[in-house]
Amino acid sequence: MLLTISTTADQATDLGFLLHKHPDKAQSFGQSFGTAHVFYPDADAGRCTAALLLDVDPVKLVRTRGKGTPDFSLGQYVNDRPYAASSLLASAMANVFRTAMRGKCALRPELAESAIPLEIVLPALPCRGGPGQAERFFAPLGWDVSAVPVPLDPEFAEWGDSRYVTLTLTGRMRLADALNQLYVLLPVLDDAKHYWMAPDEVDKLIRAGEGWLGTHPDRAAITRRYLANRRALVRAALGRLADAEDAPEEALDPVEVEEEPARTENGAAGANGAAGAAAADEAPASLSERRVQAVVQALHDEDARRVIDMGCGSGKLLARLARDDFFAEIAGTDVSYRALEGAARRLRLDKPRHRPDKRVLDVFQSALTYADDRFRGYEAAVLMEVVEHIDPPRLRAMEQVVFGHAQPRVVVVTTPNAEHNVRYEGLAPGAMRHPDHRFEWTRAEFRAWADGVAAAHGYRVRHVPVGDDDPEVGAPTQMGVFVR
């Protein structure tokens, strides 16, 4: 099976720096199911093409397949795996282009961060759903998509087309983003994987999908196919994507799914979600939604009508506050300009004559670790799923900015409860819920931090669980309401 990546960027042979593979060398890399070869059919300053050729060993392939994998009995003798791009090619990419997929290039760091013209060709790609499916999954990412069906036999047109397409993607993209998109979408289009689905597949999906999967209009379908319709894993992955909506450096649209893991009758996490079946007539609110509700309720309880959302992300909380006549003034700030663009669109701030609510003063870019006079003058500040994105050595600076410089009468802070992570089947032991989290506190750690901050700055704090309060590990989200 073959994958080619071409660019016509200035000094096109710099593609070799990005892939960490020299254009003048042909290299081979052993895989558990065969050998991957990397070489450059074209390499000059105007155009450079890198090729990944995967030579599958049928004997090794059989040894890597279990009885639970698709078409096991016949698949030992007749299958398309040596010839058609699928999860085998995705696995080879992850092994051969590992550093490139992370976007690392010490010799050309500025190039690694830049969008460059790319053309990616897969001559034989299994595509369940036909060419339209390839268009559906790749076009929203900014690619021009050509998916040409491969006929069953060119000599017998009446036989029709096969399930394979020749896929060509053209566009401007960071190479790391392009590789990660291929890593996820190749097995998704094939809708079959050659290996056992383990819980760490959720971590792989979240890592490879960072920055694009959460905003994809078909993220739910992509997640289901990637995780082979394993219900518990799919629920965990979609929950983590929804949770990422509140990250200060993400601009994600809401995903209405239940973030909390299903439970068995004894209260422990269950793989089948049987406990949720009893409530099938009325689906529960997602944890993301319940978190917003808890924050809004805390602001009502403290009669705080002028609010700044510090780390507002794409503006989900701001939009909710704007719909509530209780609030008199609303503003938001975030370190990510991309997130603020999403918030402005959501609040229609880019269309002044059509703004639904003049109480939304502004959304502006700023960092919570630096004093900014625009933070002052509000009755309340909200840091919803923000503190865990701050490097621990910089927490003290954030505390001084929020509690010492801005000094709102009320501060509402929410953050994940690390103890609850064991209830997420798709979360590997010791892993955090989002790749950008710098830490996740236990209940005792959060209480100690909150009590210390309150004492140092003249506040009192009460602690509120958000989500189902598990008797053993607590609620999935913990909230502190500080009152000066």
Image: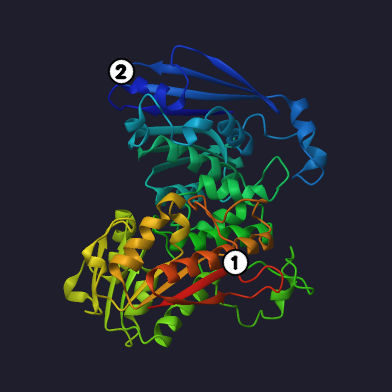
Q: Residue at x 41, y 29 (%)?
A: 105
For disc 1, the marked residue is 443
Pointer 2: residues within 10 angstroms few (<14), some, or many (20+)? some
Nearest the eye: 320 or 414: 414
Residue 107 coordinates in the image, percent (x, y): 37, 24
> Looking at the rendered structure, which numbered label has been put on residue 293?
none
Q: Residue at x 53, y 46 (%)?
A: 207
For disc 2, the marked residue is 45
* Number of numbered discs overlaid on the protein picture: 2
Asked whether residue 299 appears in the rendered view, the answer is: yes
Nearest the eye: 264 or 74: 264
Residue 251 coordinates in the image, percent (x, y): 39, 58
Do labels 1 and 2 touch, CB within 8 Å?
A: no
Q: Nearer the viewer, mark 1 or mark 2?
A: 1
Nearest the eye: 49 or 361: 361
Q: Residue at x 64, y 62 (%)?
A: 419
Asked whether, in this view, residue 89 is left or right of residue 109, the answer is right
**Element at label 1:** helix
The Cα atoms of the two marked residues, 1 and 2, are separated by: 57 Å
The correct choice, above or below, for 134 with respect to 57 in the image is below
